[in-house]
Image (cartoon, rainbow, N blue to C red):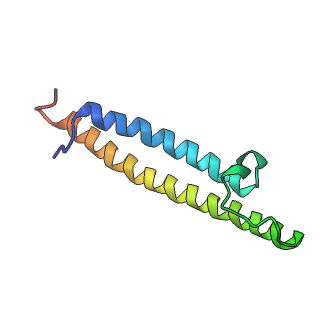
Amino acid sequence: MPLCGPKLSLCGLIISVWGIVQLSLMGIFYYIGSLALAEDLPEIDIDLPLKEFYAEVDRGFQQNAINCWIAALLYLITLAVSAHQFWANIRSPLSL
């Protein structure tokens, strides 16, 4: 039973694929500690001793990587729903 039209389901498919690719790559780059993404880390007190500062930075990178991978998994769910709707629209005799 289609809940949305063929164009909306196709749009959901395309956006989901792009979201999965982008967030997976961002998760990888956060995981390896890419300095280009350092601006997006949570607030870190710069008055900490050097070892604690580095530990906080590493913790921020790891947390952002996990958040990106969780969001990519949510896009995977959206991809499955959109693919099901696209398939339902293709099989429906009333599709426009």
Furthest toward the left, the residue is 94
Closer to us: 5 or 48: 48
Specify the farthest residue to the front: 47
Please report the residue visible at 76 percent of the width from the left and 49 percent of the height from the top: 34
Specify the farthest residue to the right: 50
Q: Residue at x 71, y 48 (%)?
A: 37
Tell me residue 16's x, y (percent): 43, 43
Q: Which image quadrant for residue 12? A: top left
Q: Quadrant of residue 82?
A: top left
* Left or right position of 48 against 70: right
Q: x%, y% of residue 30?
A: 69, 54
Q: As drawn, is 24 to the left or to the right of 58?
A: left
**Identity of the residue drawn at 44% across and 51% down:** 76
* On screen, residue 93 above or below 36: above
Which residue sits furthest top? 96
**Is residue 5 shown above or below 41?**
above
Nearer the observer, 43 or 54: 43
Tell me where residue 63 appears, x and y as whole percent. Answer: 64, 64
Comparing 95 with 5, the one in front is: 5
On screen, residue 29 versus residue 17, left or right, reads right
- Residue at 18% from the left image edge and 43% from the top image edge: 2
Q: Quadrant of the C terminus?
A: top left
Quarter location, residue 93: top left
| Number of numbered discs | 0
